[in-house]
Amino acid sequence: MRLPRVQLFEFNDSNWAPAALRDTLVESLSLALERGRVLRDAVAPFLRFLDACGSTEVLDLCAGAGQPAAIFAREILAAGRTPPRFVLTDLFPHPAAWRALQATLPSYLSFVEQSVDATNIPPALGGGRARLIVNALHHFPPRQARALLLEMAREAPGIFVAEGIHQNPLRFAALAPSALPALYASPLRAKGDFAGRAALTWLSPLALAASVWDGCVSSLRAYTREELLELVAPLGDAWRWDWGELDFNGFGKGCWFSGVRSGR
């Protein structure tokens, strides 16, 4: 079932939402991606993408709590390959979470503590690095998504997009086995805000309700293959594009989308 795309709000990308709620949702989703092995099917195409664009450094935009980059790095190591060096950035940085991840993968993860707008990448930060964006493109309405992808392509050898969501909101339920434990363990992972997160998760249904809302809205915001190709159409024949599906937990669906400059 494919529903029309709608651009409703999500708590985790709203400035007006309490920081404790945003952090709870972002970190819980990050752990759910890892424990649910949502990105497992994206690893092989990501390796092909790296080979095609010849990049050893990847600028991770809208990195959230940083787990997607860590997942890619660990899976690539497990495959007997050397991962690229990921540079984590976000409009709302998570330096504490990133620092903890960096300690586990010091050779492959670094980060920028300052806020980085993915639609306006500083040239000194982006020059020559491949671009990665995971579970974030759907946050942008079509006009902004097009601007984002065009900005990602600027001075980049390639861009890789992964989304662990499907246009059918019912498939969001596939994340429940990994997302619910991650959500309710959030206060135990809090750095200095135990009371706030406990109030949101253990003492009220607010975090759960916000998580379910955000998941359903994310599904309704998801882009199809045809829509993605339309968004990057202004780049013309200068880029080669590829697309594929992700399958996880027997029911979950997502997709990956990559582009490499022609001639590479």
Image (cartoon, rainbow, N blue to C red):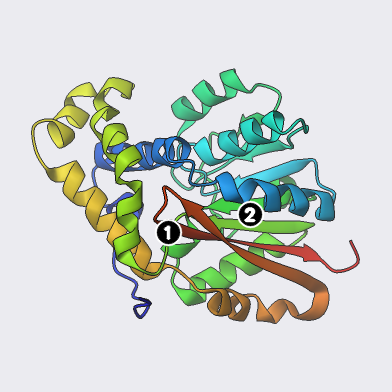
Closer to us: mark 2 or mark 1?
A: 1
Q: Which residue is pictured at 38% across the width and 77% down the height?
A: 2
Q: Which residue is pictured at 70% across the width and 44% down the height?
A: 58
Q: Which residue is label 2 attached to?
A: 121
| Residue 194: quadrant of the picture | top left
Q: Which residue is pictured at 73% across the width and 51% down the height?
A: 130
The percent position of residue 198, horizontal first and vertical second, equals: 17, 28
| Residue 242: quadrant of the picture | bottom right
Mark 1 residue type = Ile
Residue 55 in view in this figure: yes
Q: Residues within 10 Å of mark 1 (few under 14, many from 20)?
A: many
Secondary element under disc 2, as helix, strand or loop, is: loop
The percent position of residue 86, horizontal first and vertical second, equals: 66, 37
Depicted 40 relative to depicted 77: above or below: below
Residue 129 in view in this figure: no
Mark 2 residue type = Ile
The percent position of residue 214, horizontal first and vertical second, equals: 29, 56
Secondary element under disc 1, as helix, strand or loop, is: loop
Left or right side of 129 for 211:
left
- Who is closer to the viewer here, 198 or 37? 37
Depicted 236 relative to depicted 43: above or below: below
Q: CA distance from mark 2 to mark 1?
A: 26 Å
Q: Which residue is label 1 attached to?
A: 165
Which badge, 2 or 1, is on the more N-terminal residue? Answer: 2
Q: Can you name the residue that lies furthest to the front here?
A: 250
Q: Which residue is pictured at 34% across the width and 72% down the height?
A: 7
Q: Name the quarter where the C terminus is drawn.
A: bottom right
